[in-house]
Amino acid sequence: MANKIESEPCEGGRRITRLVSTDRDIVVPDSVDGAAVVAIGPFFLSGSPASDGRTVTVPGTVAEIDRDAFGGIIGIRGIAYGGTMEAFCSLGLDAEFDVEVSTADGHRFGFLSGYPMRFPAFDEAIQSMNFKMTQELAVSRLRDPVLLTPECGERYRRYLSSRIMPRAEQAVTSGDTSRLAELLSTGMFDDASVRTLMERSLRSGKTAVTSMLMSELYSRRKGEKRA
C-alpha cells in the first residue's frame, strides 16, 4: 500500500503526481477520490526509497505516462501493466534501466536500458546496433512476436539462422527440454531439423527429449491433416 499519494485533475480523470511507497510491489491505484487514474506525471516515484528488484503495477486505466515518470528512482526491475502490450507501447516510453514489462494480455519482455520501451521501435533500434543483439533476445521476440513487423522478424531469423541449431543440439545433449521447447517455439525448425535432433537424442539416450520431439512431429502432422 502506498504511504502517500498526490494527484491532480486532468482530462478524463486524475494524474498521479507523487506516490511514496516502501513496498516491494509499488501499486498505482486505479482511482483516486472516486475518479479514474488515467495519467502519471514526471518523477512520480522520486519520494520512494531506492530498493533493488522492485515492481511497479500500473492499472489499465492509465493511458498517458510522462517520459520522465520513472526518473529519480533506482531499483525498478519490473512494470506490470493492466492493459495490452499494444496499449503499453503506445505510451511512447524509453527505458532508463533494464526492465521486464508484463501486460494483462499475457505478453512479457525485458527491455534494455537506453532503448525504446515499445515495439516496433525497440526492434528497429536493437537491430541497428548489432553489438547489442543476443540470441536470447532474438529467440524471445520470435517466441512471442507481439507487434513484430515482417521486416524485423526476418532480420531476427537471419541472425539466428546459423546459431539456433547448435543451441538446440546442446539442449538435446544436456537433456534440457524447457530450453529446447523455447527454441522450437520460434518456428525456425522444419520437420527435417526436428528429426535430426531426435536422432541425436536417441544416440544420447535422452528419453524425455526424444518423447518431446516425437510429440512435436505428431502435433505438426495433426495440424496438417486438419488444414
Image (cartoon, grey):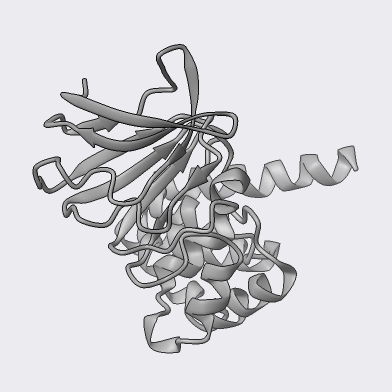
Foreground residue among 49 and 114 = 49
How many numbered dots are placed on residues in this image?
Answer: 0
Residue at the (19%, 47%) spot, across then down: 46
Residue at the (9%, 42%) spot, across then down: 49
- Give above or below for 141 relative to 221: below
Residue at the (19%, 26%) spot, across then down: 4
Q: Give coordinates of residue 94: x percent, y percent.
A: 42, 63
Q: Give coordinates of residue 188: x percent, y percent.
A: 63, 66
Q: Is residue 37 visible?
A: yes
Foreground residue among 44 and 101 = 44
Give the left or right position of residue 53, taking residue 11 as reference: left
Q: Give coordinates of residue 69: x percent, y percent.
A: 35, 51
Residue 58 image-quadrant placement = top left
Foreground residue among 105 and 72 = 72
Q: Is residue 198 visible?
A: no
Can you say which quadrant of the picture contains the N terminus? Answer: top left
